[in-house]
Image (spheres, rainbow, N blue to C red):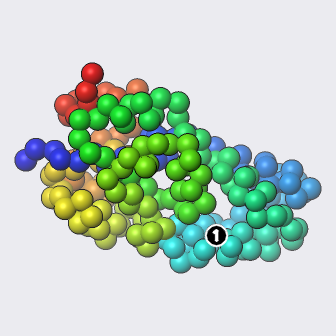
Amino acid sequence: MALRFVALDLGNVLCDLDRQAFPRALALAAGVSFDDAVRAFDEDAWRELEVGALDAGGFRGAVLTRLGRPVPDDVFDEAWNLIPTARAGADALVARLALPHAIWSNTDPIHADHLARSLSCMASAVHLHLSHQARARKPTRSYYERGLAALGASAAEVLFVDDRPENRDGARALGIVVEAVETLAELERALRKHGVLRG
């Protein structure tokens, strides 16, 4: 069966991730040590944020309660948004796709809004399948089933590109075509391999 869509992850595919950037910036903003900022991070709240069970205000509150210091919302979000950085050349590469693309990502609403301002391929996607809106995360079966349903595609008609093996395994279990990439060069090679890249 011929491919009809390309589904792209964000982190380590279209953007770089620096998970230490947030506690560094939060420590500076709050006047605490880096270690204190690291300890303030609430992973449970972050997971809830990523599946829409907690809103941005609830996430900020959970972290700042553990930190014990106030930080304005805009300063907190600026620090949080230092984690993902759009990769130079990502938009240009996606623009060369011969097939429509979707974004399939475990992404919270703060990061999603931030990346939408720096990655035009999010606006040009036929569907944004983001975990906080889908209320499910990769690699759960329901996440992929909803993504396929939104595209109106069968599993074999979608090429899914992701950096994490557990996410690829979850997709592969449904019959989705998968490729592992961690750099734009690897992404270009994977797209060429499947004949879905122009130029």
**Residue at figure coordinates x 80%, y 74% from the top left:** 65
- x, y percent for residue 106: 47, 59
- x, y percent for residue 88: 53, 30
In front of the other: 12 or 113? 113
Residue 127 image-quadrant placement: bottom left
Amino acid at dot 1: Ala
**Residue at figure coordinates x 72%, y 74% from the top left:** 62
Residue 36 can be seen in this image: yes
| Left or right: residue 14 compared with residue 38 | left
| Left or right: residue 164 compared with residue 65 | left
Position of the C terminus by quadrant: top left
**Residue at figure coordinates x 24%, y 59% from the top left:** 151
Residue 175 can be seen in this image: no
Q: Residues within 10 Å of mark 1 (few under 14, many from 20)?
A: some
Q: Is residue 119 above or below residue 67?
A: above
Count of labels in the image: 1
Residue at the farthest top position: 199
Residue 172 image-quadrant placement: bottom left
Callout 1 secondary element: helix
| Left or right: residue 177 compared with residue 39 | left
**Residue at figure coordinates x 66%, y 51% from the top left:** 81
Q: Is residue 118 above or below residue 105?
A: above
Q: Which residue is mark 1?
A: 56
- x, y percent for residue 131: 45, 65
Residue 67 image-quadrant placement: bottom right
- x, y percent for residue 185: 40, 26
Q: Is residue 25 above or below residue 106?
A: above
Residue at the farthest left position: 1
